Image (cartoon, grey):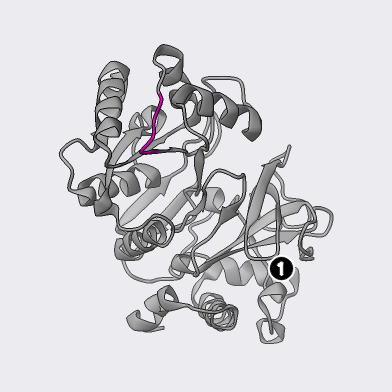
Amino acid sequence: MKSKEKTAFFNICSDKEFENAALSVFKFQVRNNAVYKLFLECLGCLPEKVATIKDIPFLPIQFFKTHKVLSDKKSVQETFLSSGTTGLQQSKHFVSDLSLYEKSYLKGFSHFYGHITDYTVLALLPSYLERKNSSLIYMVSDLIKKSGRPESGFYLNNLEDLSKTLIELDQKGGKVLLIGVSFALLDLIEKYQFKLKNTIVMETGGMKGRRKELVREALHQQLCKGFGVRKIHSEYGMTELLSQGYSKGNGLFKTPPWMKILIRDTEDALTILPYGETGGINVIDLANVNSCSFIASQDLGKTYNGGSFEILGRFDNSDIRGCNLMVV
């Protein structure tokens, strides 16, 4: 697959175009991804029999912890690591072309929110800043830089400075994006109260062991009250993906045109469920062309007609039932 073909999916305009592009990427990865090819062989899947995206087997996300998932022979430019928990193995996403990641998150943000230069970006991501090789930090760092605003930046433990900056910027009337991990946003509103009118508050999920986990409704209710906003936005991304989904506050996420969510049966991982039924979230991310674009995540959710999806939780155990072949 030539370089132009690897980026053509960024111009997808229809479901048919997505289907064609996904099948093309599937054929490319079967030929060039040794791990994915062996996984298909273990399943008894014949690639030539795959006629639609619903026929494509999805690689369990644990493979990023146990195998080098690559479809490209070029040298690796960056290895992104998952946050992980002490004693648990981290996922590793080997990225051979960082320009694909950069193009994906920039076009994805623009698709939902407009050009990044219209925003001042304030980041409250202490748990991510405290470790190396975070894909989220890479993305937000670039968004901060490309915003071109002197006030844009990261905040670690300096909540007082963040509070003052946030209030001043919001009162000036320009667009502000505050992106933060859930526990840090809660820390901020416990010390300071806000009545924001021009700020998007976006949570990236996760308490990272710092606080008790909350259901989304309870978390957003607290954050709305503390920041004085009507809605809390959310970002859906992970180390193993180069694209992100976004929610503008109603609990429903949408993806950019080169990304799609399918729901699998929790009892039969190779069966795709219809709209409105709860199951495991399968992600097609065509920006992952150089690793694996077809990933069975550990998240539970639903999809709806129109392309939106909802996150309902995670699997209780580490195995994704019916799809744990080869995992060591």
Question: Image point 51% across, 27% down: which residue?
Answer: 223
Question: Image point 41% across, 73% down: which residue?
Answer: 10
Question: Image point 41% across, 62% down: which residue?
Answer: 111
Q: Is residue 122 left or right of residue 46?
A: left
Spot occupied by residue 265 in the image (x, y as percentages of width and height): 80, 58
Q: Is residue 82 left or right of residue 107?
A: right
The magenta stretch spans residue 266: no
| Amino acid type of the residue tagged 1 in the rendering | Cys
The magenta stretch spans residue 196: yes
On-image quarter of the N terminus: bottom left
Spot occupied by residue 31 in the image (x, y as percentages of width and height): 53, 80
Q: Main secondary structure of the magenta part?
A: loop
Residue at the disc numbered 1: 42
Where 191 sits versus 76, above or below? above
Where 261 sits versus 20, above or below? above
Q: Nearer the viewer, residue 319 or 246?
A: 246
Q: Residues within 10 Å of mark 1 (few under 14, many from 20)?
A: few
Spot occupied by residue 310 in the image (x, y as percentages of width and height): 66, 49
Visible in this render: residue 71?
A: yes
Q: Is residue 11 left or right of residue 305?
A: left
Where 316 sits versus 161, above or below? below
Name, please, the residue furthest toward the right.
Answer: 267
Name, please, the residue furthest toward the bottom.
Answer: 48
Looking at the rendered structure, the secondary structure element under dot 1 is: helix
The part of the chain drawn in magenta is: 195-199
Residue 170 figure quarter: top left
Visible in this render: residue 134?
A: no
